[in-house]
Every structure is written in structure tokens, then in C-alpha cells.
Amino acid sequence: MSAEGKARALEAEVRSVDATRILSITGEIDMASAPQFQAAVAQAAEDRPEILVVDLSQVEFFGSAGLSVLLVAAESVPAGSLRVVASPPVRRPIEVTGLDKLLTVFNSLADALAVEEPRRPA
């Protein structure tokens, strides 16, 4: 496959700020990278942090497999503790599928970290 046709590899970084765990993802999330995304989310949620922020602000493509991972993540952590930071390519499928009613979505990591109490979706 040529370099132009190759998808940008998924990279994950986990860090903690007080009782908040931040999972930052870069690259593309599709059928091929979804298992890696799922594993990164599971690892970040492993010890059940008070708040889990999944920062997808650097994700350039977000397919339906990524939506499934977010749904599983939302069900595996306490209600209101999952926060998703979405780039425009991530926000669009979340909104089109109505998942923005189930997930708490932010425009920036700073916004997600600024909220003191877990937000419940409207």
C-alpha cells in the first residue's frame, strides 16, 4: 500500500490528574484500529477513576466501530463519569447517531477538565 493510502496509525496516551484519568488518542479510528482503541479505553478505566476523559480532539477519522467503543465505555464506568472531547470528525457521527444524548461531549480538553461535578447528559 502506498504512503498516501495508508491510514494514520492510532496512538494512545494515558495520564492522571488528581482523580481524573485522561486518555488521549491520535490518528484514525476505524474497523482496523477499533480493537486497539477498545484496549486503550479498558486500560484507562481499569481502576475505575472518578472521571474518565477520552480526548479525541486529535482524531481525524471516526467510524462506527469507534462509536461502539464509546458506548461500551459509557456502560462500564459510573454514570456521568465519562467525558468525551470531540474533534469535528468525531462530533459529527456522535451527533448524527444521537449518541450526544447519552455521552457528555466537550469541544476541548480544558472544557472537560473545568467541570467539577460529573455532568449528566441533557
Image (cartoon, helix red, strand yellow):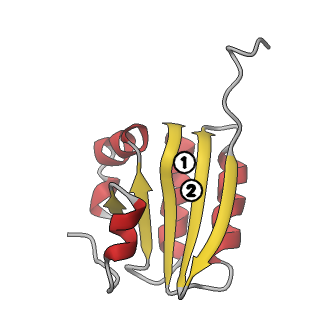
Mark 2–mark 1 distance (CA, rounded to whole Å): 5 Å
Whether the residues at callouts 2 and 1 have beta carbons within 8 Å, the answer is yes
Q: On the image, which quarter does residue 93 sit in?
A: top left
Kindly identify the amino acid type of the residue bearing the numbered disc 1: Gly
Number of numbered discs visible in the structure rendering? 2
Which residue is located at x 60 percent, y 52 percent? Answer: 25
Q: Which residue occupies the foreground of this view, 95 or 112? A: 112
Q: Is residue 70 left or right of residue 95?
A: right
Position of residue 47 measured from the top left corner of the image (x, y, whole percent): 67, 85
- Circle 2 sits on which residue? 69
Q: Is residue 103 visible?
A: no
As drawn, the label of residue 66 is: 1
- Residue 112 rendering spot, x and y as whole percentages: 37, 68
In the image, residue 90 above or below residue 52:
above
> Where the C terminus falls, by quadrant?
bottom left
Q: Which of 81 and 107 is in front in this view?
A: 107
Instruction: Characterize the local packing of mark 2: few (<14), some (14-19) or many (20 or more) Cα atoms within 10 angstroms.
Output: some
Disc 2, SS: helix
Q: Where is residue 43 in the image (x, y as percent from the top left)?
A: 71, 71
How crowded is the residue under tag 1: few (<14 C-alpha within 10 Å), some, or many (20+)? Answer: many
**Residue plotted at (64% across, 38% down):** 31
Task: Please give left or right for residue 113 compared with residue 70 in the image.
Answer: left
Q: In this view, does 91 lie above or below 104?
A: above
Q: Residue at x 43, y 79 (%)?
A: 81
Query: Where does the image place residue 90, in percent across and percent down from the top left?
Result: 42, 43
Please state which of residues 79 and 27 is positioned toward the viewer in this rendering.
27
Q: Which mark is residue 28?
A: none
Q: Which amino acid does label 2 sit on?
A: Val
